[in-house]
């Protein structure tokens, strides 16, 4: 690495921000994408399912008042039996938040009614199989996958961190079969059009070589006594030994490559011929890529580190199990048109499936409608609540899925996990089940920057497939010959959702507006996660119990 | 870390070797345990399934002659159709090597007979369920697990690296359902009686804090310009930015803890309350533990890095699928007593299930019998072959399995993966399937040092359970109250195996002894892996085809 030119092309997102705006802005950006977040006391969400590079469409409002002190982590065991006492609650939306609220409040003796705008419970917790449809504001797609239970696509949430206790507790309670979901597959690819001449690199090489160089350089510094002020002599010697193991260094603390990165000539197919470890990549080129901004640390973050889980057969197993618990509470195809305060509580007006207006009066309301939708519903909210609703930003993620022969398994030994690219498709997700089958569903795009999302959401579903294939072909040249039956979703265009997940900091909406309480993943500290939806429901329930006690 | 005493208690295996014997010995030891192995051209196996700290029972012999040049990586596609031409082959042993040989040679027109000493095909590829037995030289255990297909124990191989192409190809061919196997679970525990006051530590803390401190220290050195000879100014600045992401550093490149390590007060149950990242562990204490010797790099090694796989329902799905292909070739309960050379080829004498001697004559023999067993069978081998057989070492691994309520999932959010301890039980393996069920099978010991293996193999199966429970209780205090129906295996005591996997370097046995060829994982560069067994079979087949062409 010493012989390369000193002028290095810089395309580093974080690096650029750091240089232009100073390190505190950069740290904030890093925190937003969930990578560092080491400053204690930071109040922003640090837990989006994916790093939302640019929150959309509205900026986070400046909080005007701190929210009142509440039980920060209420749990069902905190609530007295029969505390509902036949009081009535209208719950707006049958996503995970709404169904959690009904499920738990039913137990407490509340009379719950869920108004669901669509004909399906679950909200974004959904699975697409042969014949299912994806509706956007200006399109309707029908899924053309072969009719096979292993061929499915989770357009919304698709993984569960092992420490999302509450969701996993419901899965256990409902006997939902779970299996492992893989983020970190060393056979997957990291690709950047700006590095390594645009050639995709095996994850195992980037990971092993980065670790090797970092270990080597620190060893060099230690051997030069550069850190003698920071370490005792004993610590220094121990650390030198540790780094040999940590980085796969030679006895002289050099990094000369490692079989952790694979074997020469066996990059794609593993390590059967075990002769020469593959030559290490150039450190300069690794630094010059953007791989270290996300890929190298993504799976280290608290919500992405192993183990992760998924329901066997599709994420909607969770929605269906919740629905089975609260089916009697749900009124489907009930589109809320008014949310009103009354002396006695709340009055909701909805349009039923025949187009008629129907009025529901209740003591309380829990509103889980996304703010992007809510801001266009007639209401009596306070100005502060209305203001936060109007300014609350959402991400605009898109996903594309294709059916395909499992060439990634058969030709590249990729069993699950994620490949990355700096193109708009951003990620390829290989299926984590059905290994060895002939056909599988590959998620051929999962965008989480605003610009990447826009690049697809402005296209028709049919148009999206072309860049989807062209871009993925940079990673897998055979892609265009193999994938078919493409289907896509852009969440900013899905009716009654109009966004991916909350990207603003909740403040006023954490407090009730008289007898109206708010819930939904966007109002949790786990934005974008089903666990956050559950937490937000608990928060709303706890508020109602406190108010009605 | 600057305030701690300079005298650090040293219990580091590698460190101690390094100090006593010099770095080249230490590197060799490191290579043996599969952690570094960065010296190209090293001929030793680098691929044992587990790090065999001390090969047993015999030292590696000094090679006397280099083996002749052979096709290093023969594949079935290399072999001419009908090359068998009705020649006869007697295959000794119906493990994966023996069944692979018969499977492929049947296709080529050889007439194959497999002599299997036991009543079951598969060798060490085996799964234990309710009612199954484990036989050792002086004991017979019957498995008391509840009768449930999810309650099983793989006493032998239990995971498949994603790049073991050949085995995975057979799995695909035989429609064996596979699922993900997890090595790296950040909710699992690292435990050492010699560090952290004997308190088990969450893997996520050790991993995140080690990475943080290494990044911080390298940043410090870079900021002091200590590495300006090794890096250009541009590289230096890029690396400083990279390390902030890599190690979760502050804007000032300090490591002050990270939510990657979890949240204060939420060590075991994850990160729902997201207030304060947990305080970082002390670097000195991390260095003082032995965690960095294996745990921190184990999952980085080429055969242990993600993704790994396992057959759904037990590893013996593979043995059964192979057996279904070659069932007509197998003679069960055929105990080989003589291996003789004849003018025409080979004569094998075996004792059949009635105790009668039976003689089989054939053109060729492929002997997959472990050297520990083979050395006691009457034979006509050359002195060189006999010598290598007599001196070829094997590991002596033991495993213990218990049925239990899945307290690890229910109370600790541990879904699959491995906890480590420096006690003899060495590892706990949590089941990678059946998540959410009430009952599961935990592998409560998996030893791979000679001394740890001896500690169990000298006990009766019943006696082994006591230290198994006592030691695991150091990691999980509720262990003794939960586990039951324990069963164990010490491979050095299993008839017709007498060892875990080969731990010597093969040389003479890679060459034929007239018409007798040798195979088995121990003769591959993937010792201890089923893929190695397949490779060794291909090697033997290739030799026979070359000889008979």
Image (cartoon, coloured by chain):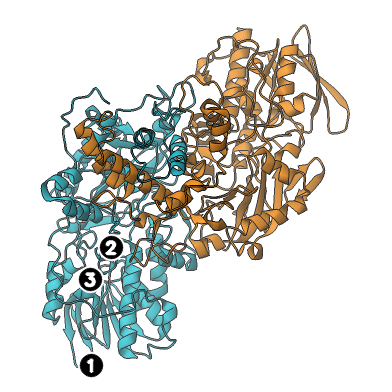
Chain colours: A orange, B cyan
**Numbered disc 1: secondary structure:** loop
Q: Nearer the viewer, residue A424 or B70?
A: A424
Give percent across and percent down for residue A405: 60, 63
**Numbered disc 2: secondary structure:** loop
- Residue at the spot of label 1: B344
- Residue at the spot of label 2: B527
Quarter of the image containing the C terminus of chain A?
top right
Q: Nearer the viewer, residue A175 or B261?
A: B261
Q: Nearer the viewer, residue B207 or B223?
A: B223
Q: Residues within 10 Å of mark 2 (few under 14, many from 20)?
A: many
- Looking at this view, name the residue that lies furthest to the bottom: B343
Q: Chain of mark 2?
A: B
Along the polypeptide, which appears first: circle 1 or circle 2? 1
Vertical arrangement, residue A384 with respect to residue B116, above or below? above
Report how many numbered discs are placed on residues in the image.
Answer: 3
Q: CA distance from mark 3 to mark 1?
A: 22 Å
């Amino acid at each position: 690495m010493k012989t390369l030119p000193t002028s290095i092309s810089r395309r580093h997102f974080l690096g650029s921000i750091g240089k232009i705006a100073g390190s505190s802005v950069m740290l904030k950006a890093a925190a937003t994408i969930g990578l560092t977040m080491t400053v204690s006391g930071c109040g922003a969400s640090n837990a989006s399912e994916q790093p939302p590079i640019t929150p959309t469409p509205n900026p986070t409002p400046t909080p005007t008042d701190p929210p009142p002190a509440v039980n920060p982590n209420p749990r069902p065991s905190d609530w007295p039996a029969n505390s509902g006492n036949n009081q009535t609650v209208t719950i707006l939306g049958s996503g995970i938040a709404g169904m959690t609220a009904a499920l738990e409040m039913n137990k407490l003796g509340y009379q719950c009614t869920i108004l669901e705008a669509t004909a399906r419970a679950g909200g974004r917790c959904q699975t697409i199989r042969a014949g299912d449809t994806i509706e956007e504001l200006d399109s309707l797609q029908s899924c053309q996958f072969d009719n096979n239970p292993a061929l499915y696509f989770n357009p919304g949430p698709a993984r569960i961190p092992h420490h999302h206790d509450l969701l996993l507790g419901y899965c256990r309670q409902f006997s939902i079969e779970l299996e492992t979901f893989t983020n970190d597959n060393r056979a997957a690819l990291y690709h950047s059009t700006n590095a390594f001449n645009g050639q995709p690199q095996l994850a195992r090489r980037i990971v092993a070589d980065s670790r090797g160089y970092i270990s080597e350089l620190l060893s060099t510094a230690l051997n030069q006594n550069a850190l003698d002020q920071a370490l005792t002599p004993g610590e220094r010697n121990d650390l030198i030994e540790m780094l040999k193991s940590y980085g796969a260094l030679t006895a002289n603390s050099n990094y000369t490559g490692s079989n952790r990165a694979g074997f020469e000539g066996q990059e794609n197919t593993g390590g059967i011929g075990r002769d020469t470890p593959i030559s290490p990549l150039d450190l300069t080129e690794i630094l010059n890529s953007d791989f270290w901004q996300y890929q190298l640390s993504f799976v280290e973050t608290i919500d992405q580190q192993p183990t992760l889980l998924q329901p066997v057969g599709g994420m909607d197993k969770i929605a269906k199990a919740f629905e089975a618990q609260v089916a009697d509470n749900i009124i489907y195809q009930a589109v809320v048109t008014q949310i009103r305060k009354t002396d006695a509580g709340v009055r909701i007006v909805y349009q039923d499936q025949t187009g008629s207006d129907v009025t529901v009066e209740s003591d309380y309301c829990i509103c889980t409608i996304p703010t992007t939708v809510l801001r266009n519903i007639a209401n009596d909210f306070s100005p502060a609540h209305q203001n936060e609703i109007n300014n609350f930003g959402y991400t605009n993620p898109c996903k594309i899925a294709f059916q395909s022969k499992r060439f990634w398994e058969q030709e590249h030994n990729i069993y699950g996990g994620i490949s990355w690219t700096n193109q708009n498709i951003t990620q390829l997700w290989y299926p984590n089940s059905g290994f060895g089958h002939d056909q599988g569903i590959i998620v051929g795009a999962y965008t989480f920057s605003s610009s990447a999302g826009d690049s697809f959401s402005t296209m028709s579903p049919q148009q999206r497939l072309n860049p989807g294939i062209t871009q993925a072909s940079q990673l897998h040249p055979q892609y265009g010959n193999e994938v078919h039956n493409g289907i896509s979703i852009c969440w900013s265009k899905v009716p009654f959702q109009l966004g991916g997940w909350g990207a603003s900091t909740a403040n006023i909406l954490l407090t009730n507006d008289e007898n109206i309480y708010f819930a939904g993943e966007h109002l949790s500290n786990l934005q974008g996660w089903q666990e956050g939806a559950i937490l937000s429901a608990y928060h709303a329930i706890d508020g109602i119990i406190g108010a009605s006690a």
